[in-house]
Amino acid sequence: MRSLIYVSSALVLVAGTAWADGAHPFDNSDPTEALTILEAPTRSCESRSGVCLIAGARSTSAAESQPVAAASPKKTPQMIQRFARAQPKGAWSVEVDAVLKRAAVAGNALFILFDTEDPQAVENHEYTAMYQTSIRAGRTLAARLTFHPDEGFRAGHNYKLRVVQLLGGKEVMLAEVEMGLL
């Protein structure tokens, strides 16, 4: 029993030493944070209800948009904004400026990313990543998302981003956009 206590103490000491340099795992000031809510949009969206995507760091650049077939023949094809990264193993950083489909309520919101290579992913709620954060009430939202390859994001894949709130036991869609990573 005594050796178990010593082992536990050693583990706590090692963990405490790792945080001594200020790199606490819950520190939100880290610029590589997966999701950061921004104070204001960096540019305004052209439509009354839409989402604009721009490169969020020097390590990411916007690439030529690529058309995707429309769900119905009467609709025009959707243009997918694509993003490339400067370093082969680096992360992608994308800023999202949205005019929301519905006004957000102050409180928690979910940013859910689905890999569109699996057509059933959205329907089955099989997401690549999900982030939760607090947002302000209103019709606009600005955020920076960082996608790391070691967290499941892959070059050559398109991802659907949904921003939702859970209100009254229902998932309320605030914004949705598809993007590609190169």
Image (cartoon, grey):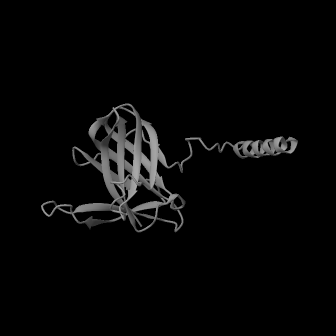
In depth, the one of 20 and 154 nearer the eye is: 154
Q: Residue 126 at what x, y percent from top left? A: 41, 55
> What residue is shown at x 42% (from left), y 54% (from top)?
127
In this rendering, the count of numbered labels is 0
In depth, the one of 123 and 141 nearer the eye is: 123
Pick out the residue farthest to the right.
2
Q: Residue 143 at what x, y percent from top left? A: 41, 45
Quadrant into which the N terminus falls:
top right
Q: Residue 56 at what x, y percent from top left? A: 43, 53
Quadrant into which the C terminus falls:
bottom left
> What residue is shown at x 70% (from left), y 43% (from top)?
19
Quick check: 22 left or right of 91? right
In depth, the one of 20 and 125 nearer the eye is: 125
Pick out the residue farthest to the front.
1
Q: Residue 104 at what x, y percent from top left? A: 32, 35
Q: Is residue 108 above or below residue 129?
A: above
Q: Is residue 41 visible?
A: no
> What residue is shown at x 62% (from left), y 44% (from top)?
25
Q: Is residue 103 above or below residue 177?
A: above
Q: Is residue 155 visible?
A: yes
Q: Is residue 167 above or below residue 164?
A: above
